[in-house]
Image (cartoon, rainbow, N blue to C red):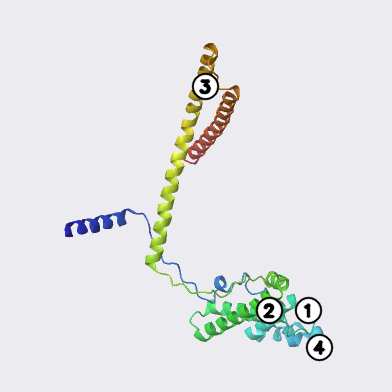
Amino acid sequence: MLRQLAWTIVQTRGIKHKINVKWVRPEYVPAYKPEKSGDLESLPPIPETAIGRDYALTEEIKDAPESVKKIFSVGHLGRKEYNILVKEELKNRVRRHEYDFSTAETKIANMTGQIRYLQDNMDKFPRNSKMKQLVQERIDKRKKLLKFLRQYDYKKFEWLLEKLNIEYKGHPESFHKLSRKESLRRLTEIHCEDIRNNKLADYRNLLESQQGPFLKEKLDSLKFIRSEQLELKLPITVTEQDIKKVEQQLEEWTKKDEIKQQAKKKKRSSILEVD
């Protein structure tokens, strides 16, 4: 009994090495990355010479010299003013009127500007834990607002995603932990399924290649049986319709076979050209 058990263990260990299945752990993607958050667009292109939001509303800045405009530009005022302009540019895409500040779409646009600004900073400073927590909170809050808008006004939800260039990725209903054992089992099942499909395809091709000679032999046999029955004045069991049916099947097979042969020739010629 022990010998049989040891022999089965040795056999399974040997089979495990023969199966060509390799599992590689997927690369970790942080939650703040655009791949996870659903942002299909980076920061909008705002030049450094653009005037700050509050300063651009004044009449004096229009007639001011270039040196003064440079002082009140985004490049001189810093990243905080640049972030304000980013949010304003995104809000202008979706706001209903000039004084629209509290609708769902303007709130989502405002959060989208903050998220993209923080994502850009996280690429430069990936170890900033406070900023990482802040961007994750903004992403989760935006998901809740998008879920609310999707539930109550789906047309506006689609329009907003198109305007802000966002892909909606809701919270998963259940959490599934990734494990090596389960992944290897799934890969092995896929590998076995591929082997089975390849063998079935080879067997199907073999049967299709034998179909032509079989139909020719069948046609000759039917003609011979019919002629013998007519000569001997026996009850006729093979009609002309049966013979025509087999002839049609043979013609269809010959056409398919010609197409296959042409495809094989083209494939061989392309392989020779590449070599």
Residue that badge 4 annotates: 60
| Nearer mark to the viewer, of 1 and 4 | 1
Are discs 3 and 1 less than 8 Å apart at CB?
Answer: no
- Whole-percent x, y for residue 41 in the image: 63, 70
Inspect this view and state whether residue 46 appears. no
Label ID, residue 222: 3
Considering depth in this image, is 45 or 114 the residue closer to the camera? 114
Where is 6 relative to 140, above or below? above
Q: Which quadrant of the structure image shows residue 15?
A: bottom left
- In 3D space, how far apart are the residues under numbered discs 4 and 2 (Cα atoms)? 30 Å
Q: Which residue is mark 2?
A: 109
Q: Nearer the viewer, mark 3 or mark 1?
A: 3
The answer to which of marks 2 and 3 sits earlier in the sequence is 2
**Foreground residue, 151 or 36?**
151
Residue to which mark 1 is pinned: 96
Q: Position of residue 95 (x, y in %)?
A: 76, 79
Of pointers 3 and 1, the one earlier in the residue sequence? 1
